[in-house]
Amino acid sequence: MLAAAADLGALRASAGGRAAGRWRAFAERALDRLVREHPLLPDGTIPVVPGLLSAWSPSVMDGYASMTQYNGLTLFLLQDAIDHWPRGSRRARLPSDLVGGLTADLRPRGSGLVQGRASRTWWALSGRRSQADGRYQQGIVGVKVHDGGRWRELLATRPQRDAIGSGWLLRTPRGRARLLLRRVAGDGRHARLRGWWKLRGKNYRRARWEVRAGGGRMLVTTEPLRRGESLAAAVWTRPGTVVRAPGGAVAPLACTVSASGPACPQTIAFERRARPRLEIAAGG
């Protein structure tokens, strides 16, 4: 994916136009992440996913993936990126570089992703489930904090197959409702998201989320629970990440391995008639 992103960025940048600088920056970021997350192994191969450095398990990658195929595909895409490298264009800043920047794709056929940037905190969430695959569920996707001159990931990649899902689930007297976010306003430091809780395909009631970020943490607040309702969620953290749920309960479970490496699920439950609040922060 990163090699394909680098190739796409190089091709778009070499075509020129007003966005050429952003596409060049996009390609360079993809290459930088490829080198950092997929280091060359002693035998000359590149791990398909970083999680293979922690545990040699086929469960951390797609069944159709193989080292031989993906190493060859990666080299092909990187060579194509080199052949089309936009040497004459200047790099520009990406939306995620802007403090306070907020980007969303909540169109009916869009990705469903929302990402924002505060001073030292970057976050991303998915406003809906797009596939049955656990990696594409609704929920909090990523939180990064800038610490010691580098960006530190607080969350792990969500597993492809696991009984613990990241989606927020509202239990009501009429059944279980899932979240579907449709609109966003504000900025990366304070975003306001609106949508619906969907119950058996129909609108159950309105959903209101607030995301506040900064100081090395992300805080999510939802609308108050009503009588007979409870709210459950989960996040997949990297070791050392702190999860708090004032007024609720956090249960850390046994760590496993996902595509990014060690992944530690923490389930969250709210049952009081109050506004659920979830905080994700860097550990000491």
Image: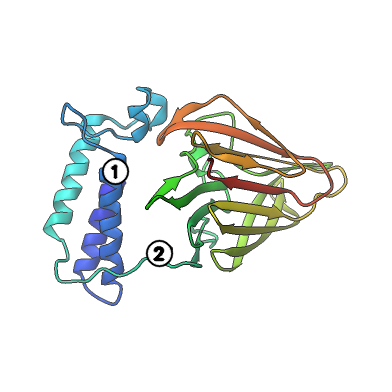
- x then y, percent, for residue 179: 66, 50
Q: CA distance from mark 2 to mark 1?
A: 19 Å
- Horizontal side, residue 275 vs residue 220: left or right: right
To which residue does mark 2 refer?
97
Tell me, yes or no, if residue 137 can be seen here: yes
Q: Are marks 2 and 1 in contact (CB under 8 Å)?
A: no
**Residue at disc 2, secondary structure:** helix
> Residue at horizontal 33%, vertical 31%?
64
Query: Could you tell me residue 196's position as x and y percent?
Result: 70, 56
Answer above or below: position of 208 versus 158. below
Res 41 → quadrant: top left
67 over 244 or under it: above or below: above
Residue shown at 79% from the left, 53% from the top: 224
Q: Earlier in the sequence, mark 2 or mark 1?
A: 1
Where is residue 127, by image quadrant? bottom right
> What kind of residue is marked 2?
Asp
Residue 103 image label: none
Q: Quadrant of residue 236?
A: top right
Report the number of numbered marks: 2
Q: For this view, does 187 lie left or right of residue 37?
A: right
Nearer to us in this view, 49 or 283: 283
In the rendering, at what x and y percent does residue 105 appear? 50, 62
The kind of secondary structure element at disc 1 is helix
| Residue 255, x across and y down, in percent | 52, 26
For residue 260, side relative to residue 256 (left or right)? left
Tag on residue 36?
1
User: Which residue is the extreme one toward the bottom?
Assistant: 18
Q: Residues within 10 Å of mark 2 (few under 14, many from 20)?
A: some
Residue found 84% across the figure and 41% down from its top: 173
**Which residue is located at x 42 percent, y 26 percent?**
59
- Type of residue at label 1? Arg
Along the line of sight, the residue nearer the viewer: 37 or 113: 37
